[in-house]
Amino acid sequence: MGRYSHRGRQTPSKCAINNPVIETLKQTWAEMTEEGAPFAWSTQEVRGIPMRVFDNAPPNMRFVWEMSAQHADRTYIVFEDEVITYGEAHAMVRSLAHHLVDQHGIGSGDRVAIAMRNYPEWALAYWATIAVGACAVGINAWWTASELEYALNDSRPKLLIADDERLERALEVLPAVRAEAPMHIISVRSERDLPDDASRWTDHVVITGAPDDLPTAEIDPDDDVCIFYTSGTTGFPKGAQLTHRGSVHNVMNLAFASTVASAATAKAAAASSNAAAADGDDETSSPGQVDDLGQAVVMVPTPLFHVTANNCVLHPVTIGGGKIVMLYRWDAGRAIELIERESVNMFTGVPTMSREILAHPDWQTRDTSSLESLGGGGAAVQPDLVEKIDKTRGNVKPATGYGLTETSGVITAVSSAFFLARPTSAGLVMPTFEYKVIDAAGNEVPSGERGELCVKGPAVVKGYLNRPEATAEAIQDGWFRTGDIVYFDSDEFVHIVDRVKDMVLRGGENVYCAEVEAAIYEHPDVAEAAVFGVPDERLGETVGAAIYLTDGSTLDESELAAHLAPLIAKFKQPDHVWFVDEPLPQNANGKFVKRQLKEQLLTDQ
């Protein structure tokens, strides 16, 4: 089928500022997406709408899991002192999958809820569920009993797999949930008494004696693979319906981003080496050349019930035969210890975690030389952090990806020298997304101007479970409104300015919170900062900032104002500043909970 792209472009614009690093990336990008190339795409109808689809995409996520069986002897998951190989994981997944089918009749169209912290059982339950054609429902492990009840009633799973803490909350609401629909429970790492019809993980999941094959299953590419609930910043959380096709395309987008970056880096290194040789320089090696480093070892510090950890770490690491290192809970010191012990080469968290790692005293004393990439997503990586990562000890390079639950993972990605060349950007839009930028009235704005980013592609979710109105509002003719204010530079790199709802309208002037936060973070005494709107009778809103300082800092409001004066316009500078004594509150995915913080600070005034 013929190719097409929004505004006639898919490969980043050729008429841009001449930067050799960026030019190399663009050339490599074009080569890897041309017809017959590994990441070639063509236009197909997806749910009745023409979309870009990778020609070599696997048919579903079960196929992705089965591909990892070839790595049977490799370590798959490390959790504290526990180690699980790929072979052991496949045996356990097969045994659970047969239990789901044989004992509960679970298959296509059914749902299994998973409620636990990042235990290995989370990943195993996930793979078993989707392998039989059912849909995995990711339950936020921080939710209260009433929030858990809401999600279970909304998603109506046939089965709940829960650890001890979540099981305690589930038992509180079990009668109310079962009044709506029957639901069996499998407990994980719990010794508490169970209802008569509940069972324990160890009753069904085995390694020795596991079935030789998975149960058969018919899976359509557009079947639901999982439901992840949005953070619920307004009203009840919405269950986003991610499809097999969408998750497969996110895996391929991530593989493309990694492959194109490595190939472009190698080309740039070769060009540099050839230039040096022509000049008579005997130095032929270059940092950044790509070598076969063996098994990828990736730390996953964020919750698996979000796309950042599940779709953007678990999926690609699994298909590639990598090792996943899990933590019981986030602690920068413990993370550094495990980076050393397990020779972690990639850390994918939220920016706050990267800051805490670099600021921790153990960072200077432990052997973290294996680490090559530090970054992640979930929030913008501020330019000062990009620079700090690049200049820290070892060969660590910054990386980031931008996306949403509703896009099954990343929309853009950027790393290493390309991130350093565009430190205020979130990277280039992945090949199977079309994009446009619109104003408040829904009209497309000229290239380079700010507006709300809209994207279309197979990775966009099917919709919100049981919420047709919300689905119709967010997704129109296949176009998903991200709610993010962005602009594209001349090389088609995306620059995220702010969330639509996270913008302060101060006396008719737009103040983008992310811009103010980035300026505040340039002060070395700032550990954490969150900017938000404060109601004002005269101006409508003014700018407020909550700041948590580094140990021993005496930074005050006047010194902060002096720091910001040359960086941002006066109307953007905070009118209200709170220096808080404790780290800022975060949700389960590591994002600052601004609404809660704002309400607390204004109430305490």
Image (cartoon, grey):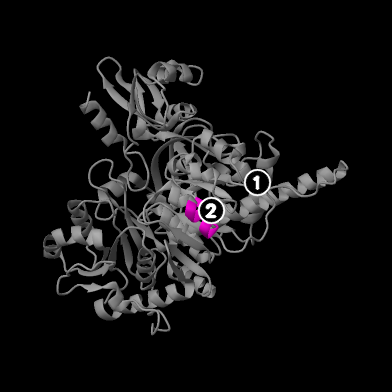
Residue at 51% over, 54% down: 339
10 Å neighbourhood of mark 1: few (<14), some, or many (≥20)? many
Image x and y of residue 374, in percent: 53, 47
Residue mark closest to the camera, 1 vs 2: 2
Q: Is residue 564 above or below residue 245?
A: above
Identify which residue, 108 or 588, lies in the foreground.
588
Could you tell whether 417 is left or right of 246 in the image?
Answer: right
Identify which residue, 364 or 326, lies in the foreground.
364
Q: State the SS at label 2.
A: strand
Q: Is residue 549 above or below residue 25?
A: above
Q: Quadrant of residue 310?
A: bottom left
Please say whether residue 343 is one of the residues in the magenta stretch. Answer: yes
Q: Residue furthest front?
A: 365
Residue hosting label 1: 25
The amino acid pointed to by label 2 is Met
Image x and y of residue 361, in percent: 49, 41
Residue at 60% over, 51% down: 369
Residue 458 visible in the picture: no
Identify the magenta region.
337-347
Q: Are marks 1 and 2 in contact (CB under 8 Å)?
A: no
Dot 1 or dot 2, earlier in sequence: 1
Residue at 77% over, 44% down: 272
The amino acid pointed to by label 1 is Leu
Residue at 38% over, 76% down: 217
Could you tell whether 408 is left or right of 240 in the image?
Answer: right
Image x and y of residue 160, in percent: 25, 66
Residue hosting label 2: 346
Image x and y of residue 134, in percent: 33, 69
Could you tell whether 513 is left or right of 415 in the image?
Answer: left
10 Å neighbourhood of mark 2: few (<14), some, or many (≥20)? many
